[in-house]
Amino acid sequence: MPDHLSADDMLAEIKAQPHNLDSLFTETDHMIRDALTPKQILSLHRVFTTGCGDSHHAPLCSELAFESIAGLPCEPMTAMEMARYAADYIPVPFPDDPLVVGISVSGSVARTAEAVAKARERGALTLALTGNPAGALAKAAERIAQIRLPELPKAPGTTSFAANLVALYLLAIRLGEVRDRFHQTEANRLRDELRGVIQAMEATIQAVDARAEELAQAFKDEPEFVFTGHGPNFGSALFSAAKVIEASGASAWGQNTEEWAHLQYFCKRPQTPTFVIAPPGSGYSRAVELVPIMKRIGRQVIAIVDQGDTAIAPLADAVLPVASSVREAFSPLLYTLAGELLAAYHSKATGEPPFRDFSGVYAPEKEGGNFIYAEE
């Protein structure tokens, strides 16, 4: 858990992400290529991904990449569900199949280590995606891919989330390459495309920064926020809401675009700021249908959309534009930035310290043999 993290610390880390991720890219790619043998990859018919908090949101954001690029069914699952329920029933039709990927930057999250250990006992091939090769998760897994994050003075969970996303995308590319879904030339083109998305983060930060600060000030007395998203950006909605909760302590919901119409539509505060995360893609048309309904019942609609959007942006009260077109499978890298910046600026506008300044509350102590640890 961060020690006296400030809003300015959080902003500095968000804005440093493009440089940090770009500098990590080649090493992360090599780590992923070495994580599994070709024989293990060729044995796979299914992938499970698991973690807690941000380390669960990243798997949700990468599900489409595994299915559309690797060509493998993928099921993101919280560590609790995997550890206490699914692990006992995972089908293991062949040796080294399915693959269970556990994600934890700290490597000390008890439920994630438990989930991977149980999946391994069941006979699944297990991979730890972690920053700590000596942690509980690494010890539980058969294989390890270490994510070497840069030295960061604080830890608002933005660089780590994005680094996990990049690693998961690279893993999807590697699985597709070895399984002969595309030639190595195409695999390298996909890697270059992904690196281009990282480089486009800088332009998106510049495009939304000032407007995010203005909105945070305007919304400083708002008690709650809603973020909607679909496909890989349902994870973006959950992650964005999580950053608001962590940064300023305001109540925030992350919701699937369609499910908003069945739940948050009925919330009694008509003016609730509602952020619509809607890149071009399969679910975009449903967001287009719902924005007029949000407006009709009084919601303040903030569109997080492509900079060239012509259907949602004109209807929104405010627009936080994404400054580059990107394939939907990789889009969370860009479409989470607006929520991160809004969260940090909301902390600053309200004077509320990130993480409620709970320094030292969550310590890596042992209790009954289990690590009591909140850091992801």
Image (spheres, rainbow, N blue to C red):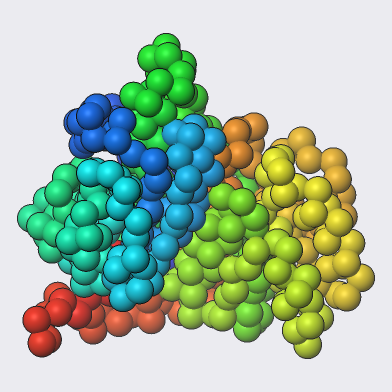
139 relative position to 10: left or right: left
Asked if residue 347 can be seen in this view, the reply is: no
Q: How many marks?
A: 0
Res 52 quadrant in image: bottom left
144 relative position to 11: left or right: left
Q: Is residue 23 above or below residue 344?
A: above
Pick whichever, 117 or 191, lies toward us. 117
Q: Residue at x 83, y 61 (%)?
A: 290
363 relative position to 196: left or right: left
Q: Is residue 137 above or below residue 28?
A: below
Pick whichever, 357 or 231, lies toward us. 231
Dividing the image into 4 quarters, which one contains the C terminus? bottom left
Pick whichever, 68 or 122, lies toward us. 122
Res 207 quadrant in image: top right
Q: Residue at x 78, y 40 (%)?
A: 309
Whole-percent x, y for residue 215 in the image: 67, 64
Pick whichever, 256 or 322, lies toward us. 256
Q: Is residue 118 above or below residue 31?
A: below
Q: Residue at x 59, y 74 (%)?
A: 253
Dividing the image into 4 quarters, which one contains the N terminus? bottom left
Res 94 quadrant in image: top left
Whole-percent x, y for residue 225 in the image: 64, 74
Whole-percent x, y for residue 158 in the image: 40, 55
